[in-house]
Amino acid sequence: MGERDVLHIKGRVLAGPDEVRDELWVVGGRISYDRPAAAPAATVTGWTLPGLVDAHCHVGLDAHGAVDRDTAEKQALTDREAGALLLRDAGSPSDTRWTDDRADLPKIIRAGRHIARTRRYIRNYAHEIEPGDLTAYVRREARRGDGWVKLVGDWIDREAGDLAACWPKDALTEAIAAAHEEGARVTAHCFAEDSLADLVAAGIDCVEHATGLTEDTIPLFAEHGVAIVPTLVNIATFPALAAGGEGKFPRWADHLRRLHARRHDTVRAAYDAGIAVYAGTDAGGSLAHGLIADEVAELVAAGLPVNAALSSATWGARDWLGREGLAEGEPADLVVYESDPRADVRVLAAPRRIVLRGTVVA
C-alpha cells in the first residue's frame, strides 16, 4: 500500500478505555472515522489498539554500552514487530536521532544519557559525576533529550555491600528544578527503599522499577503525583543476579531477593493507592527487546485490572507522554489482534497486523 491508499480497519476499535468503535479508515496516513469517497485498497479485520508503548527501553544500548546503527536498528525493529510503536528511551549513550528520519521505525522519546554517581553504575552507560556537577549535567541532558532526564537514584555501594542512595537531597532539589526550568521531566532508576523519599521531596516526576516502595513512601508518591514504571520482566532477573553476586555481596543479594519476593504486592499496593503505573521492559541492557506483551501480562499477574494494564501500554501511556492515540486526524499507528485483549491480554503477544504511520509493516 502507498501512503495515499485507503486502509479500512473493521471489527472493534478500542479507541480509549471507554470508547469502542466498529471501524476506522486510514487516509493519507491518518485516522478518519468518516467513510472516504475512495474505495479501500485493503481491509483488515480484528480488535484494534493504539500502537503499544514501551515506557522504559534502551535503543542503541547493550550490556556493554553503546552499539552500532545496525544493532540499534534491529532493536527498534524487534520492538516494532511486537507492536511497540512508541518507545520512551530511558537513557542511552548512543545518538539515535537518525531514527527520526525512518518512517518504518517506532517513534522514540529520549531521556538523553543516564547520569550516575562516580563508579556507581554499569560501566560505559552513564555520565559518572559527583553531586556538585549534577545540575549542570541535568541541564545538558534536558536539552539533549525529548523532555526527559534520567538519573541513577541508587546502586550498590561496594563499601556498604548493599544498595544505597546516590545523591544528597539538596543536590537533587537543585538539579530537578533545573530540569523543570528546561521543560523536562525527571525520572530515576531506583531498586531500593532509601532514595525514594528524598526524590519525592526534590520534585521527581517518575521512578523506574520502584521495587523499594513501602507503606511509608507509597502515600508520598500518590500525594505528589509521582508515576512508576515497574519493569517487572526485568525484576524477574533479580534471583539470578543475587545468585551471581552473593559470594562477594551477601547483603546486596539478600536485599534483591526480598525486593523480588514482594514485587507484585508492591505494584498492586501502588496502583491501589492511586499511583500511575506504566508498562516498560528495560530492554536493551541485558534484556531482549520485544517484550512489551510480557510486561503487560506481568502487571495483570501483579493484580492490576486488565483495562488498567492495557492502558499502561496504550491510551494512558500515550496521554502521559503527550503523544497521539486513535483520535480523528492523528497519525495511524495501530495494532490489530485476532481477539479481544480485554478478555485475555496474552493476545498482545501475537499481533495480526501492525500499521505504522499509515503503512502496514507487519
Image (cartoon, rainbow, N blue to C red):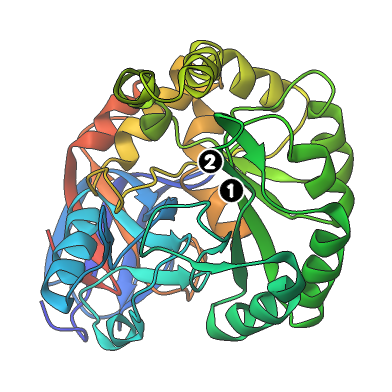
| Label 2 crowd bin: few (<14), some (14–19), many (20+), radius 10 Å | many
Write the residue at 20% across / 47% down. 45
- 129 lies left or right of 23: right
User: Element under label 2?
Assistant: helix
Tag shown at residue 316: 1
- Residue drawn at x 81%, y 53% is 168
Choose between 301 and 20: the one closer to the eye: 301
Residue 118 vertical position relative to residue 132 in the rendered view, above or below: above
Q: Name the image quarter holding residue 234.
A: top left
* Residue 95 % position (x, y): 35, 81
Identify the secondary structure beneath mark 1. helix
Confirm whether residue 158 shows in the render: yes
How far, Cα to Cα, is label 2 from label 1? 5 Å
Residue 348 at x, y = what percent?
28, 36
Kindly identify which residue carries mark 2.
Answer: 311
Q: Quadrant of the C terminus?
A: bottom left
Instruction: Please name whichever residue, 20 or 183, is drawn nearer the observer in this view of the structure.
Output: 183
Amino acid of disc 2: Ser
Query: Disc 1 residue type?
Result: Gly
Residue 109: image location, x then y, percent: 47, 70
State left or right for residue 153 relative to residue 24: right
- Packing grade of label 1 (10 A; few <14, some 14-19, many >=20) is many
Q: Are marks 2 and 1 in contact (CB under 8 Å)?
A: yes
Relative to residue 65, is residue 345 depicted above or below? Answer: above
Relative image position of residue 76 (x, y in whole percent) = 23, 64
Residues 212 and 107: in front is 212
